[in-house]
Amino acid sequence: MSKAAKKKTVARRERLQPLPPRPGPNWPILALALAGMGLSGYLTFSIWLGQPLAGCTVGSGCDVVLNSDWSKLFGLPTSLWGFLGYGALAGIAFIKQTEAHWKLAWTVSLFGVVYSVYLTLISLIELKTTCPYCLASAILMLCAFATATYEKPASLQKFSWRPWLLRTVGGAAVLVIAIHLHYTGVWGRGPGPENPKIRALAEHLTKTKAKFYGTFWCPHCKEQKELFGPSVDRLPYIECSPGGRGTPQAAVCQAEAIRAYPTWVISGQRHEGRLSLNELAHYSGFQESFP
C-alpha cells in the first residue's frame, strides 16, 4: 500500500471514530438560554397574574403585540412556548456527547430563530408596531443559533450541510407555515351558533344608533368584539385606523374627536374603554341581562 493510500485510510478511520465527549456544560449556550428563560418567564407570569409589564403602557407597541391574536398559541401564551424552547436549550447545554449536543443545539435554536422572524414580520406588517421584549427574545435566540453554528465540530460522521439544511430548515419552514394556518383559522374551528340574547343586543345597539369606534390593532377593541362572538358583524363598528397603526385617523373619528379605543357613543353619551355586555345593555336601554 502506498503512503498516500495509507494516509487516506488513516484519515478515514479518524473521521469514523466517535468525537470525544464535552468536558462540561456549554457555558455560552447555557447563559443565553437562562437569559431567555428569565425574559420569557417574566412575560408569562405577568400575563397569568394580570400584572402590567415594565415600560408597557396601554396602547404601546408591546401592549398591542402581547394582546394580539399572535400572543397565544393553542391557548397558551407565546412567551410560555419560548420559555420551553429556552429550557430545552439549557438542558441541551449539559449533553456531553459532542455530536448529539451540537445537532440538538443547532436545530432547536434554528426553530426558535425562524419562529421569532415570523412573529417579528407579523408585528411589522400586520400590527404596524414592535415589541421590545419580543425583539430582545429574538436577539437572544439568534445569538444562541450563531453560537451553535460557530461551535460546529470540525469532523462529524457522515455529515453534509446540504441534506442537513434541507431537513432542518425545511422542517422549520413547514412548522411555521402550519402555525400560520392555525393563526389564520384555516385549521381552527369555525364560529359556533349565535347566542340569541347577544345577537339581540348587537342588533339593538345598531337600531338605537349607538356607535362603536375602534381599530383593528387595538387589543381592547379585540376583547370587546370577542364578547359578541359570531354576532360581532352586527355591531355598529367604525374603523378609525383603516391605513394601519401610525396612519391618519379616519375622518369620521376625527370629527367625533375620538382619542381612546374603544369608544362607545350610546344615547348621546360617550364611554371610553371596553364595556361588559351588562353595561352596554344598561346604557342602551336593552331589557335583558347577562350572567
Image (tube, rainbow, N blue to C red):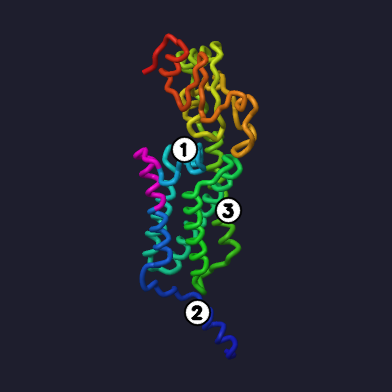
> Viewer-nearest of labels 1 and 2?
1
The answer to whether mark 1 and mark 2 are in CB contact below 8 A is: no
Viewer-proximal residue among 239 and 200: 239
Q: What amino acid type should be assigned to the residue bearing mark 3?
A: Gly
Q: Position of residue 28 (x, y in %)?
A: 42, 66
In this rendering, the answer to whether 209 lies above or below 141 is above
Secondary structure beneath label 3: helix
> Viewer-nearest of labels 1 and 3?
1
Q: Is residue 50 magenta?
A: yes
Q: What amino acid type should be assigned to the residue bearing mark 1?
A: Val
Q: Main secondary structure of the magenta part?
A: helix
Give the numbered dot on residue 170.
Answer: 3
Quadrant of the drawing holding the C terminus: top left
Q: Earlier in the sequence, mark 2 or mark 3?
A: 2
Q: Report the number of discs.
A: 3
Q: Residue at x 42, y 14 (%)?
A: 282
Tell me the CA gap for discs 1 and 3: 38 Å
Q: Residue at x 59, y 57 (%)?
A: 166
Q: Residue at x 52, y 69 (%)?
A: 150
Q: Position of residue 237 (x, y in %)?
A: 57, 22
Residue under circle 2? 13
Quarter occupied by residue 6:
bottom right
- Asked if residue 72 shows in the view, the reply is no
Residue under circle 1? 58
Secondary structure beneath label 2: helix
* Residue range corresponding to the magenta coloring: 39-52
